[in-house]
Image (spheres, rainbow, N blue to C red):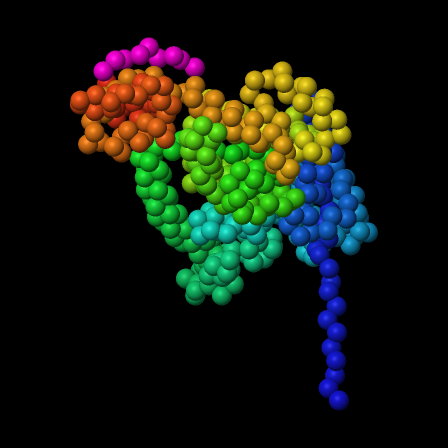
Amino acid sequence: MAKKYHLVSSGPERAFLVGVERKGNRSLWTIHDSLEELAQLARTAGLEVVGSTYQRLDHPNPATYIGKGKVEELKAEVVARGAQTVIFDDELSPAQQRNLERALGEDIKVLDRTALILDIFAQHARTREGQLQVELAQYEYRLPRLTRMWTHLARQAGGRAGGATGGVGLRGPGETQLEVDRREIRKRITHLKRELEEVRAHREQYRRKRRQAGLPVVSLVGYTNAGKSTLLNALTNAGVVAEDKLFATLDPTTRRVRLPEGREILLTDTVGFIQKLPPDLVAAFRATLEEIHDAALLLHVVDITHPMAEAQMEAVEHVLDDLGVGHKPVIMAWNKIDQAEDPDAIREQAARYPDVVVISALTGEGLDDLLARIEAVLKAQLVPVEVEIPYTDGELLSLIHTQGTVEAEQYTTRGTRVQAAVPTWLFARLEPYVVHRAAHRGR
């Protein structure tokens, strides 16, 4: 009789979390809030959180992030709880990571918030562009480190990272394995950058065609898990993955939406933001975030039921400023009103702000109001004009109808005379046919 073998699952990797509370911190985020978010990130990455700790310091210890005595406490906690991974709530320097690995023992992985976010990004990247961006960010993060956390993240590079881990080419005279690894990583980084430039050139061609078509772009922005993908699905039936997880979607999705008066827009979803998102990580997703630069309007989606909603709004605004788009018009969509304990109080508060619309992307509440508000803001950006379009240029007349608002129209012996308000890019094309320049109404 053949033997029966029973495979027993060892369960998810067990993680212990560590943070530093800076004395005199004026942020809306407390250390408890930040560690709770780190726990959410860890669970999203498939880890089991078995505990956490923090230390109050003027600033993190340059050698070990936390103090020497706290490191000893941490080591005891990790052993007692059977943790295999320790995750720190800020980005560790290469020296801090090496020192902590030595102090905690060779069986314990040491990760930081950046490595964890990169791991999640790698799991959720679906398009070729997204995978390339993640892999590049991972290698640039690893290059100065090359520690044991390497093996934890190498599995996430979609099988393409093998050339830079074990089994690289023969060493040169006097070359250490570390030097070989670094050389191989640099080669891979150069290759990835070339591939990404090709992808970006293709995306720029797409954007150029889109500009010629003249559809205004509205970019969905917001804190991760605020409900952007659910909203995109509700407005467009886009079929985008929408889960109750941080960074459930990473790759940009663009869909057409028809506004109440018939004008069409392009609605684009982007990667969710998060506090302590390192600038290098933002830079790695430059191509994805360039969609925001093209936007005529930003639609900032907020989970208004989240206890840290105000701090999350502030974090998003900070990233938008870093991206150089903080000046763009913004509509705030206070989402998840269906889950609020006191929805009437939230509606009453929102009514005080002209740029806020209360919605539920899940139930559809407020979506008609949201579309009407988008239309009103886009209208305010239009330039009044009176033109006479030759009958031979029906395409230009069609653009006036689809991209602007027509106030009056009459037929003459030479063509169609139209009084309208149009976007500035279309106004430039209409210049040869202008018969009367109306004063710009201003926003």
Residue farthest to the left, as pictured? 414
Q: Where residue 132 sits in the image (x, y, percent)?
A: 45, 50
Which quarter shows the N terminus? bottom right
Which quarter shows the C terminus? top left
Q: Residue at x 43, y 21 (%)?
A: 379
Q: Main secondary structure of the magenta part?
A: loop
Image-based side of 102 in relation to 297, left or right: right
Image-based side of 273 in relation to 201, left or right: right
Image quarter for residue 363? Answer: top right
- Residue 50 can be seen, yes or no: yes
* Residue range of the region highlighted in magenta in the rendering: 435-443
Q: Residue at x 59, y 34 (%)?
A: 223
Q: Where residue 32 sits in the image (x, y, percent)?
A: 74, 34
Q: Residue at x 67, y 22 (%)?
A: 347
Q: Where residue 377 sits in the image (x, y, percent)?
A: 47, 22
The residue lying toward the viewer, choosing from 441 and 389, is: 389
Count every numbered label the image shows and give the total. 0
Residue farthest to the right, as pictured? 80
Q: Residue at x 59, y 25 (%)?
A: 357
- Residue 295 can be seen, yes or no: no
